Image: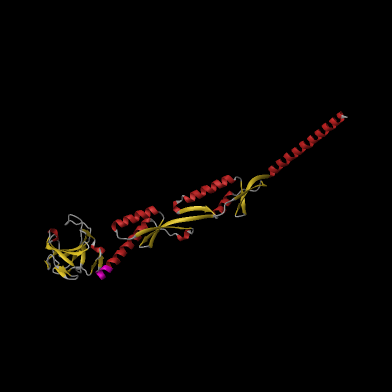
């Protein structure tokens, strides 16, 4: 009885092995046929919409990241940051071998999902934008150069960003320099015109009430000349000999005598450390210690001392240091 059972068990075992082997062969055969006709790829979807197929998702992601880095490092486009609004999603699929992958088309579709932030720099004069340039370092250098010659000018920078490249209208640094210098010159001319018309200003708390004389400026503050050993410490205003010179503000006479290269020199102290000097005069009508009132005639134009012709040398000093009179008058 046991012998018969053993024979039957062996028989069924062999039959089962045959069926399994046949099934395995069939499965391998089917897989082989499947892979002969189909290939594994990744379907790529953006924002839920399938846009194509790629062979390797890692390769696509690497190319995508490389493109983003290139954009961010492209100084010509002024790109500050690139972010993806919708990241690609990958699904493994078997597709017909005739189906071609389309990595380039997918990359183009991904570019549409890129949020690009651009940066630029505005150069401002008194808070008003005059020029727009690409690089902050160039703008800072330009402002520094202009302020060396125009220290009183209020130039500043404003860094801006936008996602709309059409908003950016930048100029080269050379064009910006030309525009800024023109604007600075125009501003200074307007300020000088106002001073000429008003003839008054506030110097360290002292109100100037009038111009010392009306005439033509022949030498400005800070210039060099063959007749001087140092830069000019005041303004030379040409006028005919004998023209009346008025004191610009109330004060006390501290000097009314011949003083070397200044010739006949009148000094007036106005308080708060403010002094005004009137040089090269032909006549002096005041004495040391005398109180004077703004607009009072204190001397007459001449050409005494180190002078090449009749004019008034006018200085403003604050705490003993000469300053540019054109900050306040003319």
Q: Residue at x 51, y 49 (%)?
A: 67
Where does the image place residue 284, in percent across and percent down from the top left?
12, 67
Relative placement, left or right, of 59 versus 248 is: right
Seen from this angle, which residue lies furthest right?
1
- Location of residue 207 by image quarter: bottom left
Confirm whether residue 177 shows in the render.
Answer: yes
Relative placement, left or right, of 306 versus 3 is: left
Confirm whether residue 240 shows in the render.
Answer: no
Nearer-the-camera pick, 172 or 159: 159
Q: Is residue 197 magenta?
A: yes
Main SS of the magenta segment? helix
Where does the image place residue 27, in percent across and percent down from the top left?
74, 40
Q: Residue at x 39, y 54 (%)?
A: 136
Where does the image place residue 203, in percent across and percent down from the top left?
25, 64
Magenta extent: 194-199
Q: How many numbered dots are placed on residues in this image? A: 0
Q: Is residue 313 magenta?
A: no
Where does the image place residue 215, in percent across and percent down from the top left?
20, 68
Relative placement, left or right, of 135 versus 230 is: right
Classify the position of the C terminus by image quarter: bottom left
């Amino acid at each position: 009885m046991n012998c018969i059972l053993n024979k039957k068990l062996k028989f069924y075992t062999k039959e089962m092995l045959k069926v399994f082997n046949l099934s395995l062969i069939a499965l391998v055969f089917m897989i082989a046929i499947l892979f002969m006709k189909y290939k594994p790829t990744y379907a790529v979807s953006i924002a839920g919409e399938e846009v194509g197929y790629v062979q390797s998702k890692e390769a696509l992601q690497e190319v995508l990241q490389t493109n983003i880095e290139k954009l961010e490092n492209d100084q010509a486009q002024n790109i500050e940051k690139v972010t993806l609004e919708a990241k690609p999603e990958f699904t493994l699929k078997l597709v017909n071998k005739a189906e071609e992958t389309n990595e380039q088309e997918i990359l183009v579709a991904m570019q549409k999902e890129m949020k690009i932030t651009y940066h630029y720099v505005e150069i401002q004069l008194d808070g008003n934008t005059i020029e727009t340039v690409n690089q902050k370092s160039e703008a800072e250098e330009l402002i520094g150069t202009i302020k060396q010659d125009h220290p009183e000018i209020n130039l500043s920078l404003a860094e801006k960003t936008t996602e709309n490249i059409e908003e950016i209208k930048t100029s080269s640094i050379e064009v910006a320099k030309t525009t800024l210098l023109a604007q600075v010159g125009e501003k200074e001319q307007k300020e000088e015109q106002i001073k000429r018309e008003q003839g008054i200003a506030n110097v360290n708390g002292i109100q100037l009430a009038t111009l010392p004389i009306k005439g033509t400026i022949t030498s400005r503050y800070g210039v060099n000349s063959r007749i001087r050993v140092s830069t000019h410490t005041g303004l030379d205003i040409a006028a005919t000999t004998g023209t009346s010179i008025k004191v610009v503000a109330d004060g006390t006479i501290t000097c009314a005598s011949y003083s070397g290269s200044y010739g006949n020199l009148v000094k007036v102290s106005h308080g708060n450390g403010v002094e005004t000097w009137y040089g090269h005069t032909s006549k002096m009508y005041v004495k040391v210690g005398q109180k004077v009132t703004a607009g009072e005639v204190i001397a007459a134009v001449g050409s005494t001392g180190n002078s090449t012709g009749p004019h008034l040398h006018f200085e403003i000093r604050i705490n003993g240091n000469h300053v540019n009179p054109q900050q306040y008058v003319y």
